[in-house]
Amino acid sequence: MTTAAQISLVNDLASQVSEVVTDELSLLAASTDRSGSVAAGLPLAVVRAHSIADVQAAMRVASAHRVPVVPRGAGAGHLVVDLSAMDRILELDPVDEIAVVEPGVLNARLDAAAAEVGLRYAPDPASAAICSIGGNVATNAGGLRCVKYGVTREAVLGLDVVLADGTLIHTGRRTMKGVAGLDLTALFVGSEGTLGIVVGATLRLKPRPVSTLTASAAYASVAAAARACAEIAAARRLPSMLEFIDRRCLEAVDRFAGTRYAERGDALVIAQADGPAAATEIEAIAAILGKEATWIEQGVDEESSDRLVETRRQVLPAIEAEGSWFIEDICVPRSRLAEAVDRISEISDRHGVRTYTLAHAGDGNLHPVIGWDPSPDDVPGVMPPAETAAGDEIFALAIELGGTTTGEHGVGRLKQKWLEPEIGADSIDLQHRIKAALDPLGILNPGVGF
Ligand SMILES: Cc1cc2nc3c(=O)[nH]c(=O)nc-3n(C[C@H](O)[C@H](O)[C@H](O)COP(=O)(O)OP(=O)(O)OC[C@H]3O[C@@H](n4cnc5c(N)ncnc54)[C@H](O)[C@@H]3O)c2cc1C
């Protein structure tokens, strides 16, 4: 874009939105994200939206100037629409068990507000303290509790969305049921900001459990740990969390925190049960976990339960402390979990690559984290060749096992080449036609998703 065109864009924005910034520091801040991917340059401007009208005006100006738009996120030659200032919880209804929120509300803040009336916002990505509801909706974020409560899609009843031309539409409803018209809410959830900008969400809340109890067990082999997880499902037990951590993760935590978890075995499983039947449920789960365990412990109160979960929380900081890393996000049928972990280990050994594997075992959602020693040859956002080759084989494995290359993080820019092998050319073509109907100029998050 020429300087004159950029000045004209910024002038148009300044006359129509509450706040537009173009200082280098703000543009730099808006051009980085945690994916490791680095934009080729700075955004043209950042619109700090304070209202739906601001977002509509920004989209109208962007359409008129044919300028691509990224809701938050990063990108050169783009207009960034920052929704963090639209952060009001507009309504919290304890009888209907719903919340109506603006997109910039942080996940953990909504959960804390719901707690005050005995409710909970169930989807809990590990980034809950820093991620927004708009971002959660755009990525259909998951988390530890999804095994029982479902992912973001299950929590969204309705959305307010500004389309590429600035039109505001309302999808869904605030009732528990409703089948009038096509389910556009589901279409926008997980669309990674490519179809419209979420400016409001009506969310379903759940009763806050009166009790949450935890059990953790270690195993001599990955296969034994996976058998325990499979048996929990087969016994029709309903954990509210079922996490798996491999030996390499445990060793990293030991180095990081001075613990001695790896002495307990090759794999660790952490399970939680919640609700009025939590005590019965965790006893049954612990009995299953204990069958082949080399070590088992049950939390007797909140403090000891929290200590058991802390191991899981320490895994990513511990890996981060060991060098460069990239987190993968495949999901396989739960019955293939053990096979997936073993094959990931075989692939990593063959490529001489360091892979730490943790998993939301109850969902079959594995996060193999590929780590390497930083080198001056590193290209930001790109893994070295052996690590890339191992990562590619892990994606191919996910598809071979009947799974997906992304369970909860989304396709973004980094996984596009895996979309066709996974969903097929005809499906991609249909998705392009849907995109063209909603965003004919292709200005919303170009290059992301499909
Ligand atoms: C430390 C860490 C831990 C994580 N743990 C998990 C986890 O356990 N489970 C999980 O599922 N994910 C996890 N994630 C990734 C997760 O998807 C994001 O953290 C979160 O859902 C994105 O929200 P955000 O507000 O950060 O969005 P951003 O990063 O700002 O945006 C994410 C995408 O959504 C688009 N977008 C943002 N806001 C809107 C909007 N209002 N309308 C339309 N599009 C929009 C952006 O353009 C971008 O494409 C983790 C990330 C980090 C950094």
Image: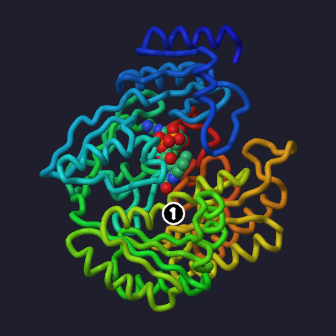
The outermost residue toward the right is 377
Percent from the top left, x then y, of residue 93? 16, 45
Pick the quarter of the image with the N terminus. Answer: top right
Q: Position of residue 7 (x, y in %)?
A: 61, 9
Give the image location of residue 211, x and y in percent.
Answer: 25, 66
The residue lying at 49 percent from left, 21 percent from top is 47
Which colouring convention does the figure follow?
rainbow
437 up-or-down from 418: above or below: above
- Rendered view: 424 above or below 19: below
Q: Is residue 421 left or right of residue 101?
A: right
Q: Are there few (<14), some (14-19), or many (20+) residues within 10 Å of tag 1?
A: some
In the image, what residue occupies the spot 68% across and 54% down?
326
- Residue kind at label 1, given as amino acid type: Arg
Camera sees residue 235: yes
The residue labelled by disc 1 is 312
How far across and down, in percent of the image, does residue 414 sit?
67, 50
